[in-house]
Amino acid sequence: MEKPQQVKVKICGLTRMEDIKAVNEYCPDFIGFVFAKSSRRYVSPEQAGLLALQARKEICRVGVFVNSPEKQILDLVKKGVIQIIQLHGDEDESYIARLRENLKSCGQAGEKAKIIKAFSVKNQDDIKAAGLSKADYVLFDNGPGGTGKMFNWSFLKEIKKPYFLAGGISLDNIKEALNLGEEIGCPPFALDISSGAETEGVKDRNKIEKIIRRIRE
């Protein structure tokens, strides 16, 4: 029997050098920088550049954007600050197609860059819409993201493409999230964790360690 693929880990919403030290120690597959000014986890492109410079090279860096100007995204890819683009706003398929085309202007970094499109899940139709996306990956979240609340995971039985699972994932429900593959026939490609890795609003080194160890056990 083929061994199931290891579910990957994304720790999102890093804002401090202490956060980078923690992820460098425990090495998740992905880290995320939030460039949406409405978020309490917002970092400026300059801050993200400094943080990314200190991150281990094997950790893939994701930029989270909400209806951002394409130029900002392309600049961050070109400078090597991020390697994956996560679109968390109203970006439609034409935006994704145009962005993918314009990434070619970023040279090799742009050619390698991947796109994640986030979908807020309220019902089964949101899952079906995600299945039609031309993004490399889709991400499922509750509401606008960063709420720390779960959505109804049973809706995911309709999805047939790689997906990031977000929305209220913590040490309390990681096992349940990892068991999704058996329940719906399509396990998550990665678990995306933000508030679940925090204590009183800041990233917690001990929680990051426990989360990563539990997923990789």
Image: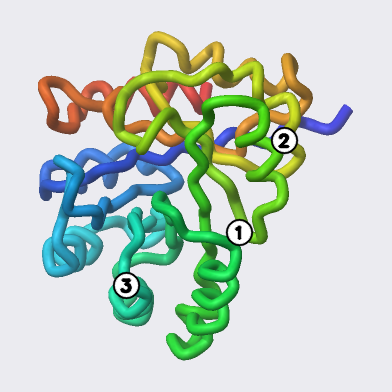
Check residue 159 in the rendering and tell me which mark sits there, or answer none.
Answer: 2
Q: Quadrant of residue 172?
A: top left
Marks 3, 2: nearer the viewer: 3
Q: Is residue 95 left or right of residue 74?
A: right
Lower position in the chain sequence, tag 1 or tag 3: 3
Amino acid at dot 3: Pro
Check residue 135 in the rendering and tell me which mark sits there, or answer none.
Answer: 1
Q: Is residue 102 left or right of residue 59?
A: right
Choose between 199 and 26: the one closer to the eye.
199
Residue that appears at 66% across and 33% down: 125
Work out how far the residue at label 1 is from the one at label 2, CA to CA, in angstroms: 14 Å
Choose between 101 and 123: the one closer to the eye.
123
Q: Position of residue 127 (x, y in %)?
A: 65, 35
**Element type at marker 2?**
loop
Q: Determine whether 73 is above or below 43 in the image.
A: below
Q: Which residue is mark 3?
A: 69
